[in-house]
Image (spheres, grey):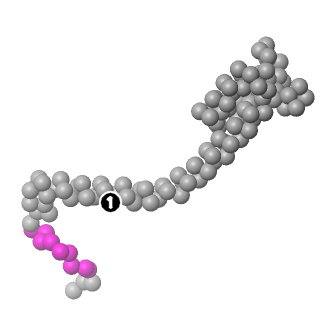
Amino acid sequence: MSNRKKENYDPAQPVCNTQDDFNQALQNAIKYNNKEAMKKAQPWAIVCLVIWFVFFVWALVLAMRLPPGKHKIEHVLFALLFSPAYVLATYLSEFSGGGNSSSKGIGNIYSSKYT
């Protein structure tokens, strides 16, 4: 005789007697699977939230260093809405143009003109 665990159902009988039983069993399995997936994803969600918050604060600091005016309001709005892209665009603009923008108030925010 083997040491196999005895199962609680008769293999000669169907597992689910009706379609409603099957639907309920499937729904319970999906809920369980989603619950387990959320448990595994929770630490990654916290890490992503912390990274996003760092970019959010960083973008606001960069936008607030601009001189007062219409462009500062636009930069703060973009910093609030698109924080990671705003930080990336700010530093890429330093390398590409070096603050040679045709509009007043836009360009290298670290130049002596703004400090």
Q: Residue furthest top?
A: 102
Residue 71 placement (x, y as % from top left): 71, 22
Q: Residue furthest front?
A: 68
For badge 1, the amino acid type reads Tyr
Residue 5 placement (x, y as % from top left): 25, 79
From what the image shows, is residue 13 above or below residue 102?
below
Q: Which residues are magenta?
A: 4-12
Q: Residue at x 36, y 55 (%)?
A: 34
> Does residue 96 appear in the picture of this structure?
no
Q: Residue at x 32, y 60 (%)?
A: 32
Q: Which is the main secondary structure of the residues drawn in magenta?
A: loop
Q: Residue furthest bottom?
A: 1
From what the image shows, is residue 100 above or below residue 61?
above
Q: Nearer the viewer, residue 89 or 104?
A: 104
Q: Residue at x 79, y 16 (%)?
A: 104
Residue 98 placement (x, y as % from top left): 84, 24
Residue occupied by mark 1: 32
Q: Nearer the viewer, residue 3 or 13?
A: 13
Left or right: 84, with 6 as reference point: right
Left or right: 67, with 15 as reference point: right
